[in-house]
Amino acid sequence: MTNQPSISPAAHIGIVSLTVSDLAQSLAFYDTVLGLRAAPVAEGRTLLTAADSTPLLELVE
């Protein structure tokens, strides 16, 4: 029997941050293709949320 590595069930991934060259084009993609909603935070920085408003992705231009 081999000892398989495991991850705690309590573990989770936080917000993923991506640097993009065109924020508007990236927002259009994530909205149209994945249905994520934009929540602007600051100039050149937007959080994308799921239907439950949990931030999943940060786009930075």
Image: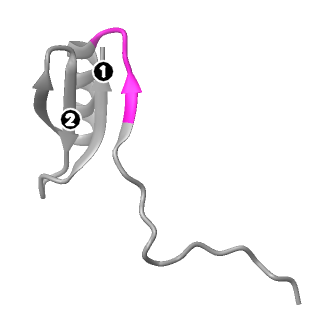
Q: Position of residue 15 (x, y in %)?
A: 34, 45
Seen in the picture, residue 17 relative to 45 is either above or below; the reply is below
Hey, which quadrant is residue 23 in on the image? top left
For disc 2, the marked residue is: 47
Hey, which quadrant is residue 25 in on the image? top left
**Residue stretch in magenta:** 17-22
Q: Where is residue 52 in the image (x, y as percent from the top left)?
A: 12, 58
Label 2: element kind = strand
Seen in the picture, residue 55 relative to 13 is either above or below; the reply is above
Q: Which residue is drawn at 46% across and 69% down?
A: 11
Label 1 near label 2: C-beta < 8 Å?
Answer: no
Q: Position of residue 55 (x, y in %)?
A: 22, 47
Left/right placement of residue 53 relative to residue 45 reads left
> Farthest residue in the front direction?
42
Q: What residue type is labelled 1?
A: Val
3D distance between C-alphas at marks 2 and 1? 9 Å
Seen in the picture, residue 16 relative to 32 is either above or below; the reply is below
Q: What residue type is labelled 2?
A: Leu
**Could you tell me which quadrant the C terminus lies in?**
top left
For disc 1, the marked residue is: 60
